[in-house]
Amino acid sequence: MKISLNILRKFLPDLRKSPGEIAEALTMGGLEVEGIIPVRDHPSGVTGVVVAQVTLVEKHPGADRLSVCEVNDGQVIHRVVCGAPNVKAGMKYPFARIGAKLPAGVEIKKAKIRGIESSGMLLSKAELGISDDHSGIMELPPDTKIGIDFNELEEDIDVILEVNVTPNRPDCLNHLGIARELSVLSGANFVLPQVILNEEGPDILESARVGILAPEACPRYCGRVISGVKIGESPVWLKEDLGRIGQRSINNIVDVTNYVLFLLGQPLHAFDLSRIQGREVLIRESRAGEKLVTIDHVERELPPGTLMISDRERPIALAGVMGGAETEVRDETREVFLESAWFNPLAIRQSSRMMKLASESSLRFARGVDPEGVALALDYAAMLILQIAGGKLARGKVDSYPGKRPGEKLSLDLSEIRRVLGDPVPSEEAARIFTSLGFQPEKSPDGNRIDVTVPSFRQDLKEPVDLIEEIARVSGYGKIQPTWPELRADRRSLSAPAKKSVNLERKARDLISGQGFAQIITYSFISPAENQVFTADNELRIANPLSEGMEVMRGSLLPGLINTVVHNLRRKFNDLRFFELGRTFRRETGKGTEIQETNRAAGVIARVEPPEGWRGLLAREFDLYHCKGILENIFNGLSLENISFQEKPSQGFEPGFSGRIVLDSQLEVGRFGRIAESVRKKYEIQPVVFAFELDLDTLWARGIHSKKFVAFPRHPGVEWDIAFFVDNSVTYDEIRKVILQSDPNLIKDARLIDLYRGKEQLAVDKKSMAFRIYYLSPDHTLTDEEVRAVHRRVAENLHQKFSAVIRE
Amino acid sequence: MDWEKKLGELESQVTELLAQAGKPEDFLQIKQRFLGKQGEISNLLKGIREIPPESRPIFGQRVNQTKQLLEDRIAEAARQAESGRAPDSGETLDLTLPGVWNPPGRIHPISQVLDEIREILEDLGFLIAEGPEIETDYYNFEALNIPKGHPAREMQDSFYIDEEVVLRTQTSPVQIRVMEKQKPPLRIYAPGRVYRRDMDVSHTPMFHQVEGLWVDRGITFSDLKGVLMLFAEQLFGEDTPVRFRPSFFPFTEPSAEVDIGCRICRGEGCRVCGNSGWLEILGAGMVHPGLFRRVGYDPAEFTGFAFGLGVERIAMLKFGINDIRLFFENDLRFLKQF
């Protein structure tokens, strides 16, 4: 909300604070000033005007109203004849030298005025084209430098405050409201504008009739009629004032209604009375099938029950939201019906929502305007119209007020102030604040309570605690002393289930990032097409997505990761490891609208070419076992044993190069593998991409055991190798099991140290493997003979079970 | 003592050969020539019978030592060569050369700031709570004093799944969920993703919030000030000026916004703080009695305060980031800096 300090001062004539101080006072009172914007509009088309000081003023010998002045423009002293009443010696004014140009092409020439030559001219704001003010010449501050060009003058014509008005304070969506608050917060005197009206026309009842058919939705309706107006451009001051608070000038009548809206907060509407059928204004709810062309020239169907204004025949305005095109004020309008009403906020919210239409008016009505301010705004607007557009005002006004209500009473228990704020506030101080806010406080006889009457413009005050806030706000939050409450340990809340899963998630994060992954965060919404790449679940659509590509809640973290790979490949990064922790979403099938959220961790690796460094190369390309190794580190770090990797296709992954991760041989906790060729093509990704996605909720639900120490013997063990040929179909896991079981007492470990197949001397269906077996006895150092015996048994078992051919 | 001389010779021969070697075959050849079954060392050992018996133990020991030494040297040289470069000799040591690159792990800046916030709050005795990101209209609005048609709904343009289901616009619904299940005293914080329909340099349709709630007998606005001052000082430094100013949230009364002195201009006024010298970091207030009534707490018995902050905003202030959208673009040039 833009607030002009010039306009504000109309209500606060003795306000002496600087713009900065005003902003500070408002901000600390709850009306945050987000910007202070000086208006330094320089007159256009002005040249040759400088700052000059009048050094001498004498009466013109030939004319009472004129003076002869000596003017110092920093170079020479000029003799100038001046007619302004406010010219004084010692003061500084804008001065037009001979040859200076003023707006509208006026050039200053030497002139003889009543016999005395005048070499230049002292200027008013009107002559400079800054405003309509030609009551006198423009006074400049005493510290202004003599001789500088007027166009370089840093003079603020006005200052605009950007005020952030919170939704609970609709009374402050205008200058009057802000001024009233500023008066409370700064102590400056607040005065309402004077309205003097000349009712020269016929009685209003002869010109128009008003009927409220929906008193619930329209508790008050006022109107006036002005005939003989002349529609035209607004005067400069009105255009400028509107412009500064961000409004466009339309014509003099519409500008007045707009101006009063921002001045007093009351939305007004001006109808062309001659176009109102039967000169009858009805406030009623719409009937089925009624239509209205609004002033934006859109034909709108009114849903039945919409609050609107109609004449005898048809709708003429969408009450409180927008006027109709048919009855709007136009160039040929001569007779104006001016509406000022109080519509029920609920009714306006409903029509605004149903019609998908909002305006400065509807915004204010929806939040609540002051029902007691309706008539004042009407009269003020009428006065301005008479001033600006001429015409005659009909005698009297319509003021139909079926919904008048007495002021709301609230009662505050004074001990509550301390209970909520912590600091006691003396009852005198509370009463003083309430008085300044216009609450008419009354202390109860026992002195324990204060009763207040809420003013009609403060519809936000509903409970005693709202009054406590008023006290805190006006006396200042800064005055309240900080304290620190006692902490009590609470076992019940310490065992919050979220704590465990969040800690585990952080552990998972460290385990993944510790392997060179960069954490990313992507939006939770993606395109349906992307979503389908990695999941077959029912998609969860957003009814009102922000844009294309953000229509569904993600069913997998992988699309975000793939997109990040694409983004960074384009930026020439060639070694990519990303992971994300976050939730995925799906609609539970068969459970209606039940929505399932799952915490997941997912990662992706891709390498275009090994990163080059001065020391040479890293491994050429990632493969499936890199991916598996990363997962094994995660599971080890989380003390999760009993994890197996099973080949099983999964959406978006390459069949035969991917699988599922299974816990305790039955619980599926994730998937991993190579991203499908087709997906890479679709995303135009060159390198092979490997990915994994884990279901953290299932992992945490199963429970993570704490780590257990296993004692190890102090004497050394020995490592013996065994190499053999075996059928391709025999898996590593099967072989390793047979080795370990050959002597569970002495064999502690068996590591695969070599694997190859498809070499010349090897049959196609065979592979060569080598294991390094770790022998260790719990109670003594093993001799070669002992080891040899077991090692031989291993060889025999491998031969027996798998027909392995042991190599020398 | 010929064998000792011989050992010395072998050693220098190996050193010489290694200096010329480059390809893996070279190293294999050297290894075989000196350490293989028919190699120099083996041959030397075969001559043990010509050694006087009393010198034999020493001889064995020395030969084995040399064998080990040569093995190590060849292996080391081979390893060096494999990584693309001859062993660095003392004269060419250049410590300005970059270290060998290892893929470094990165924690997203939002995650880092969340950690920091979490630690401070946990030190202050707050316990974590969580709630769904897809909420019902009741928890996200109604229970927080924002009935349908309330002007405060305009403050947060929301994403809807259907009429009754909304992507949470704030973490505040977690307050209600926890209070429904638990009686005071209560001291919780709730971090998480929230969603609003907005996108420009200072808004993204998704961002992170942290919500805090403390309910007990005798909790006051003074306590709110004390606790949040500590929080702001911990987050931004102990000499950070903190101020509280009135504001409006439907679910707190009185409500406050908390500002810290601008970190860029130190209160002088600059572009970042809009010339005010202050930066807003969080919203707070005393829990509105309406919420207590709704969850079955007696507002005459309990009071409490709640606060909420945007994690991206804090991160932007801390790191000097000027476009919030960078957080979700996940460009490595951005991520690498944290």
Image (cartoon, rainbow, N blue to C red):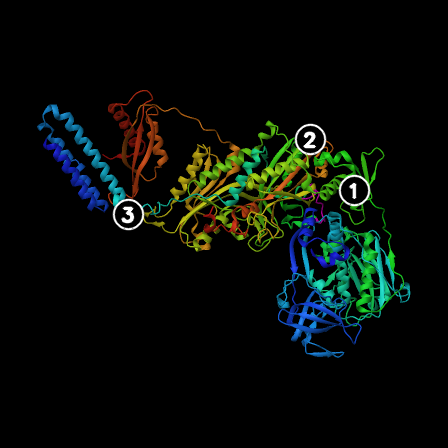
Labels 2 and 1 touching (C-beta < 8 A) = no
Q: Nearer the viewer, residue A28 or A186?
A: A186
The answer to whether residue B136 is left or right of residue A702 is: right
* Label 3 and label 2 in one chain: yes
Local crowd size for mark 2, using a 10 Å CA cut-off: few (<14), some (14–19), many (≥20)? some
Element at badge 2? Answer: loop
| Residue A20 on image: x %, y % | 66, 52
* Residue farthest top in this picture: A779
The disc label shown at residue B84, or none:
3
Of labels 2 and 1, the one closer to you: 1
| Residue A685 on image: x %, y % | 43, 54
- The numbered mark 1 sits on a residue in which chain? A
Element at badge 1? Answer: helix
* Label 2 and label 1 in one chain: no
Q: Is residue A112 visible?
A: yes
| Residue B304 on image: x %, y % | 67, 35
Rendered view: A667 above or below A339: above
The answer to whether residue A381 is left or right of residue A609 is: right
Considering the whole magenta stretch, tell me its main secondary structure.
loop
Of labels 3 and 2, the one closer to you: 2
Look at the image and tell me in which quarter the N terminus of chain B lies: top left
Rendered view: B70 above or below A332: above
Q: Could you give the CA–CA distance between mark 2 and mark 1, rounded to whole angstroms? A: 30 Å
Q: Could you give the CA–CA distance between mark 3 and mark 1, rounded to whole angstroms? A: 85 Å
Residue matched to label 1: A432
Residue matched to label 2: B217
Element at badge 3? Answer: loop
Task: Inspect the magenta stretch and tell me whether residue B144 lies in it.
Answer: yes
Please give the range of residues in magenta.
Answer: B141-151
Local crowd size for mark 1, using a 10 Å CA cut-off: few (<14), some (14–19), many (≥20)? some
Local crowd size for mark 3, using a 10 Å CA cut-off: few (<14), some (14–19), many (≥20)? some
